[in-house]
Every structure is written in structure tokens, then in C-alpha cells.
Amino acid sequence: MPRPKILDQLRMALRARHRSPRTEQAYVRWVRRFVQFHGLRHPAGMGVEEVNAFLTHLAVERRVSAPTQGQAASALRFLYKEVLGRELGDEPDAVVRARRSSSLPVVLTRDEVGRVLACLRGDSRTVALLQYGGGLRLLETLRLRVKDVDLERREILVRRGKGSRDRITVLPVSAVALLREKLERDRAQWRRDVELGAGWVELPGAFERKSPHAGRDWPWQWIFPATRIHRETRTGRRRRHHRHPTGIQRAIRRAVRESGISKRATSHTLRHSFATHLLEDGYDIRTIQELLGHRSVRTTMQYLHVMNEHGINVRSPADRLPAHTDPISPQR
């Protein structure tokens, strides 16, 4: 049989190692840009010099950030090591490495979070409330299924989060009534879909082969289903995907503008605010690490710096100046 093309080999290598679909898309995109940058030369005929030239171009000409350049370098390292079977250079630092800046996350106050939520409606408001109330990432929220939310125990089971790790986080009491009403409406919609020959959803991994009819059962349905039904090309089944993240992101950005907040807040800012507010309430760092699903506690500790940045329990020496001192008047 003919040898697969280099991008197909890359996809197979990533899937064999159970990398996420988003990682696969990003790595394929970077390898394609690398090949185009060098005039469509095959990567097997290039090496560390061409890789460094491409990474330098990204930093100098395209002015990409350090994490973006690092992702491109990781994609090319994976290509050469796992697909082409050779290392990039003999030295550990042969490939250009960008120094990552330690930027602090944007955090909203409790009042600002309330103002943003007040400007949201429908699914966008429920998604934002779950992100802030449970510390969820946006895609983790949109990929929730009916069976993953326990309204009685007020728990959310996050399946295959970042790094393919499962975890349990808290379901806010304020979201229970919203979810109960939403699930009743969605169940009626699911029954109508089944009557029309639809009602299928995507199942994880090989579970569709092990339980071929589970994709039409209520517990496996998305909590935030898409508004349209599509026909899956491989099986021909009519099914709904979950809501696309771009619509939620636009709604939250619009709500931030309408609420008059001057911070550059996004949907992920709600997750940062969840962690910071738990620290302010006295919860320990290990508990917050488990709720957020961080692999290392050092990642969670960034919120300690955010608290210090906002002056928690710190009084400025300027506030202790004598009462007759006018800091605005010019010095004599």
C-alpha cells in the first residue's frame, strides 16, 4: 500500500497516543505552516536549522506570544520524534525556546460577576453560572451530559477534562432550579427528536460499539444541545451536537460591555474568579486544586498572587499619612 502522507501520519501518531482532537488540529496546522514556510519541502529533508528559522519568523515577523511559539515548537518536536523517528539536534537546547512571561489572570469582583450574569439570558446565563459556580472551563461545561449532573447531591462530574482527567466539582445551589427547568424542556425536545427518527448523540471512544443504542438514551444527551440537527456521515444518524463555544463567548463579551466593566474579561475569567473568591473565603489551596483539576499545585498558587495584587489584608502606607498631609499638592 502507498505510504500515508506526512499529515496523515501525524494524525495517526496523535490518535495512537490518545491526544485530544484540539491538540491534533493545532499540531496539524503548525506542521502545515512549517512546510509552507519552507516552500513545500518535505520535513524529512529538513532539520533543526529550518525549525529554528520558522520559530524565529513566528517571534520576529509574526510577533506571536511565547505560549503560541511554544505550541509550534512542541508540534514540530512531536513530528520529528514520533513520526520521522529522529531528534531535533543533539543538544537539549538545540530548538529555540521562548521565555514565558508570568502574567496574572484577570479576576472579577463578586459585584462584577453579578452584573455580568444579570446581562445574560438563556443558555448563556446558565453556562456562565456553572463556570463561575463550579470553576469549569467553557468546553467542559458545554460537554456536560445529563448523567454528569447530580441535582440532589449538588455535584458536577467533569469527564475527560484537560489532560483527559475526570474530577468532581460543586454545583451551585442557585443553578439547581435553572437546570431542573432546562432539563424538562430539553427532555421534551429529545422525545420529539426520537419520534422524528433523530435523538442520537456522539459517544466517547469505543462505547458506541459496545453499547450501540446508548447514543439515543436520555442520560447521554447533552445538557446544552445545539439548536439544529445534523446527519452524521459515517452512520447516517440524525443527531445533535453540543452548543458551539463561540456563541457563548460572544454573549459573555457583550454582557461585559453592557455591564460597564473596564476589564478585559472573557468566559475563562469566570473560572479565575471562582478560584480567587474561594481563597478569599478561606478554603485551602489543595481543595481548590482538586476542584479546578490542576495537575500541579503551583498552577493553583497563581491565585494567591492575584489576591496579593489586589491588596487583600494589606494596607498602603499612604493611608497612614497625617491628616493634614495633602498628597495632591506639589512639593515645596
Image: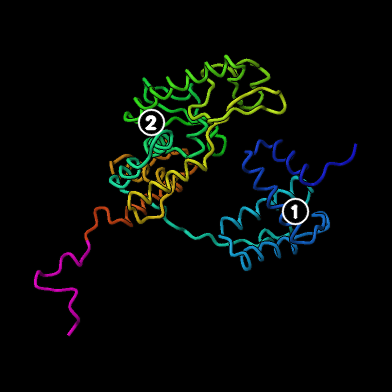
Tell me the quadrant of the picture where the N terminus can be found.
top right
Q: Earlier in the sequence, mark 1 or mark 2?
A: 1
In depth, the one of 176 and 241 nearer the eye is 241
Q: Is residue 214 above or below residue 109?
A: above
Residue drawn at point x = 72 percent, y = 60 percent = 51
Image spot of residue 295 (x, y percent):
50, 41
Q: Residues within 10 Å of mark 2 (few under 14, many from 20)?
A: some
In depth, the one of 141 and 255 nearer the eye is 255
Q: Residue furthest right?
A: 1
70 left or right of 15?
left
Image spot of residue 320 (x, y percent):
15, 65
Q: Residues within 10 Å of mark 1 (few under 14, many from 20)?
A: some
Tag 1–tag 2 contact (CB < 8 Å): no
Mark on residue 87? 1
User: Bounds of the magenta span?
Assistant: 316-332
Q: Is residue 329 magenta?
A: yes
Q: CA distance from mark 1 to mark 2?
A: 44 Å
Query: Residue beneath label 2, please?
Result: 170
Mark on residue 122? none
Quadrant in which residue 152 is drawn: top left
Q: Is residue 68 magenta?
A: no
